[in-house]
C-alpha cells in the first residue's frame, strides 16, 4: 500500500460521516461516501459535495467535492484501502453483513468509534458470513469530530480532537494501521489493543446513567438544563463512581488496565478533583452543554446495548459482578420498553463465548485463537 496513494471510503452520512468525508476531501484525499438510505445523500449527490463550516482557524472549511456518493456498498469500497465506519454502534452488525461479500485482501476497517466490543463483533460477523479476505478490523476510542449536520449537504465542524487512540485486531497490526491513517489524519495514535479502547469507553459511564437518573427533569423541562454541571449532583456522581469502578474491575479481570473516569477528565480536560464530582465541577469544557430533549436518545438507545451490556457480559466472563451497571441497564430497558440485554452486544456476539481468558488475550494481542474460534 503506497502511502501517498491511499484511498478512503466513509461509511455513514450522519453528523460524523459527513464531517469526515468533507474533511478528507478538503485535505486532498480521494474519498467516497456511502449511506444506506439513498434519500439521505441525494442533496450531496445533486450538489457534487458537502459544504463544510468550521469553528477555528486550524480546521479546513469550504466546499468539499465528492466524486463517489452512493448507497451501493460495493461501489463505495471498490479500490479503497481504508474503510472508515462512522455509524451508531447499533449499525455495526448491519454494515459488517453488507461488507462481508465485497472485502478484498489488504483493506482496513476502522470503527469510529467502536464503543465497547465493536471491532470484535464486526470481525466475528464478517468471518461468520464466510469472508476469506485478509482484512484488518480496528476501532477508535472515540469520534474524531465534534460536528453537526446543518442540512443534508452542509456540516459544521466545531472541533477536531487533538489525539484519538486506535487499535487493531491483532494488536501487532496497529502500527501499520496508524501509518495508513496518518496519511490523512495526524490525530490518530496507537492504542494498546481493542479491549483497552473498548473498556476505556468513558461515555458508558457519563451517558446512560445521567440520562436515566434525570428522566423526570428531562421530561418536565424538555432538557432545558446543563446536562453535566446540573445533571450530575453529588448523589448522581456516587452512582457514576460505582459504575466506573465496576468497569475498571472488569478490565482488570481480563488482564487489561482501564483508566478511571477521573483520570480521563484530567487527561482530556485538565480537570482534577479528589472525587469524580469535584473533577466534573472543575471541567469548564462541559459548561453550557444541554441535556437531551427526550429520554428517547442515543445516550440510552445506543450506549446501553453497545456499551453497558458488553461491559456486564465481559464481567460475567471474568467473574466480576456489575450490580450498578446492571441496574442502569434494567432501568433503561424499562424506560424504552426494550430488552437491551437481548438487543445488546454480548460475548457471544463478539465471538468470545467459550474462550478462556488466556485465549481471549492471545487472540486480541497476537491474532491466535483456539480451534474453532474467530
Image: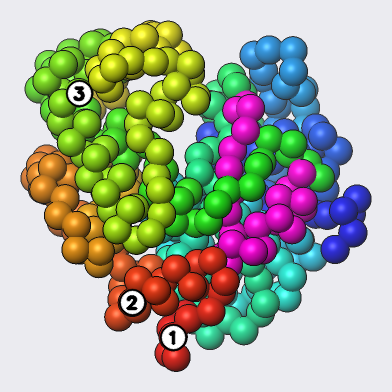
Rounded to the nearest angstrom, the CA distance separating label 2 from label 1 is 9 Å
- The first of marks 3 and 1 along the sequence is 3
Mark 3 or 2: in front is 2
Neighbour tally class for label 1: few under 14, some 14-19, many 20 plus, Cα within 10 Å = some
| Residue 285, quarter of picture | top left
Residue matched to label 1: 370
Q: How is the image coloured?
A: rainbow
332 or 193: which is nearer to us?
Answer: 193
Name the residue carrying label 2: 356
Q: What's the residue at 49%, 25% (across, down)?
A: 267
Whichever of labels 3 and 2 marks the residue nearer the N terminus, that label is 3
Task: Establish if 317 lies above or below 51.
Answer: below
Mark 2, secondary structure of its residue: loop
Instruction: Give the image location of residue 198, x and y in percent.
Output: 42, 51
- Residue 223 placement, left or right of 63: left
Q: Position of residue 133 (x, y in %)?
A: 66, 79
Indicate the quadrant containing the N terminus: top left, top right, bottom left or bottom right. Answer: bottom right
Please state which of residues 327 and 103 is positioned toward the viewer in this rendering: 327
Q: Is the residue under label 1 in contact with that under label 3 (CB below 8 Å)?
A: no
Q: Residues within 10 Å of mark 3 (few under 14, many from 20)?
A: many
Q: Nearer the viewer, residue 42 or 12?
A: 12
Task: Determine whether label 2 and label 1 are within 8 Å by CB.
Answer: yes
Q: Which residue does the image show at 63% across and 27% down from the upper left? A: 162
Name the residue carrying label 3: 237
If you read the primary sequence from the N terminus, does the residue marked by circle 2 or circle 1 appear first?
Answer: 2
For the record, the magenta segment spans 160-182
88 left or right of 14 in image: left
Identify the residue at horizontal 13%, vertical 42% (top origin). Answer: 324
Q: Position of residue 307 (x, y in %)?
A: 32, 48
Q: Is residue 313 visible?
A: no
Question: Can you say whether 202 is above or below 135 in the image?
Answer: above
Amino acid at each position: 500500500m503506497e502511502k501517498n496513494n491511499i484511498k478512503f471510503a466513509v461509511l455513514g452520512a450522519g453528523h460524523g460521516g459527513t464531517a469526515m468525508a468533507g474533511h478528507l476531501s478538503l485535505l486532498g484525499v480521494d474519498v467516497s461516501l456511502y449511506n444506506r438510505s439513498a434519500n439521505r445523500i441525494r442533496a450531496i449527490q445533486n450538489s457534487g459535495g458537502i459544504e463544510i463550516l468550521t469553528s477555528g482557524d486550524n480546521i479546513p472549511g469550504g466546499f468539499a467535492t465528492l466524486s463517489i456518493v452512493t448507497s451501493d456498498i460495493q461501489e463505495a469500497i471498490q479500490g479503497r484501502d481504508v474503510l472508515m465506519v462512522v455509524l451508531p454502534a447499533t449499525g455495526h452488525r448491519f454494515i459488517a453483513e453488507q461488507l462481508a461479500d465485497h472485502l478484498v485482501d489488504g483493506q482496513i476497517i476502522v470503527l469510529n468509534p467502536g464503543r465497547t466490543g465493536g471491532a470484535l463483533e464486526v470481525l466475528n460477523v464478517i468471518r461468520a458470513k464466510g469472508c476469506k479476505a485478509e482484512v484488518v478490523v480496528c476501532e477508535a476510542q472515540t469520534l474524531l469530530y465534534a460536528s453537526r449536520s446543518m442540512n443534508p449537504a452542509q456540516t459544521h465542524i466545531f472541533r477536531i480532537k487533538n489525539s484519538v487512540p486506535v487499535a487493531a485486531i491483532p494488536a501487532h497490526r496497529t502500527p501499520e494501521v496508524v501509518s495508513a491513517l496518518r496519511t490523512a489524519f495526524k490525530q490518530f495514535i496507537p492504542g494498546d489493543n481493542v479491549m483497552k479502547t473498548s473498556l476505556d469507553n468513558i461515555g458508558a459511564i457519563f451517558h446512560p446513567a445521567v440520562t436515566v437518573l434525570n428522566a423526570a427533569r428531562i421530561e418536565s423541562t424538555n432538557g432545558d438544563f446543563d446536562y453535566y454541571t446540573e445533571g450530575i449532583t453529588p448523589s448522581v456522581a456516587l452512582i457514576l463512581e460505582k459504575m466506573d469502578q465496576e468497569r475498571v474491575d472488569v478490565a482488570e479481570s481480563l488482564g487489561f488496565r482501564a483508566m478511571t473516569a477521573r483520570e480521563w477528565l484530567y487527561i482530556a480536560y485538565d480537570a482534577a478533583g479528589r472525587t469524580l464530582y469535584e473533577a466534573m465541577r472543575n471541567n469548564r469544557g462541559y459548561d453550557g452543554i444541554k441535556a437531551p430533549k427526550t429520554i428517547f436518545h442515543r445516550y440510552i438507545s445506543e450506549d446501553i446495548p453497545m456499551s453497558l451490556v458488553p461491559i456486564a457480559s465481559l464481567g460475567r466472563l471474568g467473574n466480576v459482578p456489575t450490580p450498578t451497571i446492571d441496574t442502569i441497564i434494567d432501568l433503561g430497558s424499562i424506560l424504552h420498553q426494550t430488552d437491551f440485554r437481548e438487543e445488546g452486544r454480548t460475548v457471544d456476539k463478539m465471538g468470545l463465548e467459550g474462550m478462556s481468558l488466556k485465549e481471549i488475550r492471545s487472540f486480541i494481542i497476537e491474532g491466535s485463537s483456539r480451534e474453532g474460534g474467530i
